[in-house]
Amino acid sequence: MEVTSHKNKGDEIIDIGDNKGVLLDHKAVYTLIGTTLDHAEDETGSQFTYKNPNVKASCGCGSSFNIK
């Protein structure tokens, strides 16, 4: 995930309120269908958490997954 203001043809913008959105790369849209995104903040910091019902396996660090 990264901050960007550039939208390529086919990319999707998901409105998350407060005049903010999440831009999905057109190549990732079908992989992420059904995924929920949550943002949590506490005294130690903030983080995004994802729940993708299509995931069959994932790594321990949370940065990669397999849907096959």
Image (tube, grey):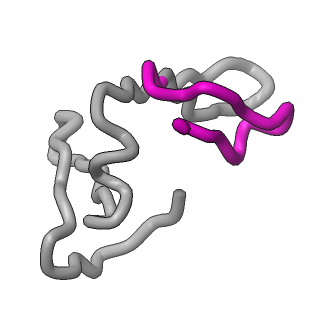
Where is 11 relative to 50, above or below?
A: below
Q: Quadrant of the C terminus?
A: top right
Q: Nearer the viewer, residue 37 or 52?
A: 52
- The part of the image, by quadrant, that contains residue 37 is top left
Left or right: residue 7 versus residue 58 is: left
> What residue is rendered at 37% in x and 28% in y?
35
- The part of the image, by quadrant, that contains residue 13 is bottom left
> What residue is rendered at 60% in x and 23% in y?
41
Q: Which residues are magenta?
A: 52-68
In this rendering, the count of numbered labels is 0
Please name the predominant secondary structure of the magenta segment in the image. loop
> What residue is rendered at 14% in x and 71% in y?
10
Of all residues shown, which one is farthest toward the front?
A: 68
User: Does the segment drawn in magenta span residue 64?
Assistant: yes
Q: In x, y percent, where is residue 34?
A: 30, 26
Q: In x, y percent, where is residue 20?
A: 23, 47
Left or right: residue 47 versus residue 26 is: right
> What residue is rendered at 70% in x and 46% in y?
63
